[in-house]
Amino acid sequence: MSDIITSGLVSLDESLGADKRAVIEALAARVASAGRASDAAALAADAWAREQKDETGLPGGIAIPHAKSPAVLAATLAFARLSPGVDFGADDGPADLVFLIAAPDTAAEEHLAVLSRLARSFMRDDFTAGLRSAATPQEVVDLVIAAVSETPATAAPVGATAPAPADSAVFIDGRPARIVAVTACATGIAHTFMAADALTAQGGKDGIDLVVEPQGSSGYKAIDQKIIDDADAVIFAVDVDVREPQRFAGKPVVRAGVKRGIEQPAQLVAEAIAAAKNPNATRVSGSAAGPSDTAGATGASLGGSIKRSLLTGVSYMIPFVAGGGLLIALGFLLGGYEIAFTVDDILGSSTIWNPGDTSLIVYLGAVLFKIGSLSFSFLVPALAGYIAYGLADRPGIAPGFVAGAVAGFMNAGFLGGIVGGLLAGIAARWLNSLDVPRWLRGLMPVVIIPLLASIFASGLLLLVLGGPIAWLMTVLNDWLSSLTGVGVIILGVVLGLMMCFDLGGPVNKVAYGFATANLAAGIAGDERYLQIMAAVMAAGMVPPLAMALASTILGRGLFTEPERENGKAAWLLGAAFITEGAIPFAAADVLRVIPAMMLGGAVTGALSMAFAVTSKAPHGGVFVFFAIDGFWLWLIAIAAGAVVSAFTVVALKRFARRGGAADDGTSGAETVPSVAVTA
């Protein structure tokens, strides 16, 4: 492997560009010019895509952009010592040591193992110091070859524990704590092994028995099951699903991204020890998944878990609403609005082969309307079921869905679904935390937890809570019925402010959830809810459209090139009602972008309600024009809000002080990675 890097792939004390994308592209070009990649642009694109998933900057001025790419012909390292450094996302500042790790998408195990050994060398101060003091490219090559030729002395073997003096140990039951950990990143080359070494070293400092299983691209050696069984807790520092997670079933668990394993190993170990001592800590279920599980934030407060579970419930509910709403809108388009009252008669007496007195178009409209209506019937159960899932993982789904169905039966609406989902999730979470005998553990998630949590949550709704919640829903409906004139406009202002406050976050989801959860009532004939749906969707379109207008037309010089590229994409995102298209701009300048977006959202919400525009579709933006009554007035409301927000954000960037100094016209242009956003 002595040819993995050559002096031609090394750049010392040069500026390769003003931002990390330029650095990645320059290093990819070096790899291609050395004949080790067939397409520099394709390699750069793959590395940049990986960078967007999780920034590769590390503490100590290091960055390791990396990719497995079909454009790579041979496993390769390209190195740059930058002057000045470039921000790769590390908390402690720019990186001056940058390695581009390029592996073929069909890389052999030995190549991946070599690249992994290099990544582990970054944890050694002598290695990074040597890179900074190297006088020639060949010195860098020699350092790297030495590092990849043998396992660094400071790195503990994979799967080994890290012993330490007994007087420094953290004790559980009179012995040093026993922790097992899994590390894994998307490519399985760099972060996976760096996190493993950082955790192993921390275990040694804390005097505990800590065994790490790095799950890399070159495979992994599973920790002995007896070690897992004897462990007090487990750490999952992963960006992808844990392989064979059932091995850890029942263990108290701390979950985090792999970079936290590199940057904050002491905190992760401390959290794992605290979880081991906490009888109510979240545990790995028999079917535990990866880090994306919203139930996985062990160590988080109950309040934080509830907030995440509410977002989870709304997120999983949206496809039922979006699909069902659009099907209903298409049903109206084909069958007319009277289809809502005749659909059962049409489907009961006609078929596609024999539509009888009904035209084929009207019959198809009835079919679409019925499918959409049935989709809507899952709305509250799905909301409750996935709120419970967010709190308790899979054992919470069944009791959550049952509680949602009970909420619908009690006419408690979406508020009843939220309460039922929370009750089911909390009950399932508590039951899952119980320390039960091993013979009973397998029955807990599939029988005992769904049974007992369903009895608890649905029983409370039926016997105690359902009636008061149904009464509250009636009061809310009566209040909406009483709104006229200025009251309707004020409601539009409030909804617009909520939709633009956090650009897809909890407050945005509360407003959107309120609108979509009542859309069925609107379609059944209550136009107030259709007006609310139109106002919510219109206000949610303002932020990306406003930032597109500001960054590509009104104030191009106030934004960086990546932001201007984001602005081009934001036109389409805004038109499609994807509010998150404005997040990259807000992340770079939250104190000036968010107020400007809220101002425009308030204008749009107020105008939409004042114009009495209605929408029978919960999503889709301008592409569901056929479901929006008063479409042109609706567009005027959106355009007004977008223009107000765009001019406001440009004015704030140009004239508002930031960091104690007025802008010179360019200080608002931070480097922000472009992002791909989905609805």
Image (tube, grey):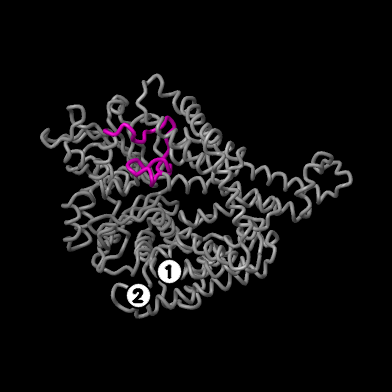
**44 vs 617, nearest the viewer:** 617
Residue 570 in view, yes or no: yes
Residue 145 covered by magenta stretch: no
**132 vs 104, nearest the viewer:** 132
Tell me the SS state at disc 1: helix
Residue 138 coordinates in the image, percent (x, y): 21, 59
Residue 209 coordinates in the image, percent (x, y): 21, 33
**637 vs 124, nearest the viewer:** 637
How crowded pointer 1 is (Cα within 10 Å; few <14, some 14-19, many 20+) is rated as many
Counting every numbered tag in the picture gives 2
Whole-angstrom CA distance, mark 1 to mark 2, is: 14 Å
| Left or right side of 166 for 252 | right
Q: Give the overall secondary structure of the magenta segment.
A: loop
The magenta segment is 277-305
Q: In terms of image quadrants, where is residue 113?
A: top left
Residue at image point 65% right, 68% down: 611
Mark 1 — residue? 593
- Kind of residue at badge 2: Ser
Residue 22 coordinates in the image, percent (x, y): 37, 66
Mark 2 — residue? 667
Q: In terms of image quadrants, where is residue 27?
A: bottom left
How crowded pointer 2 is (Cα within 10 Å; few <14, some 14-19, many 20+) is rated as some
| Left or right side of 283 for 679 | right
**606 vs 631, nearest the viewer:** 606
Marks 1 and 2, the one that precedes in the sequence: 1
Which quadrant, please, contains the C terminus?
bottom right
Residue at image point 23% right, 55% down: 141
Q: Is residue 109 above or below residue 93?
A: above
Residue found at the very far top of the displayed protein: 439
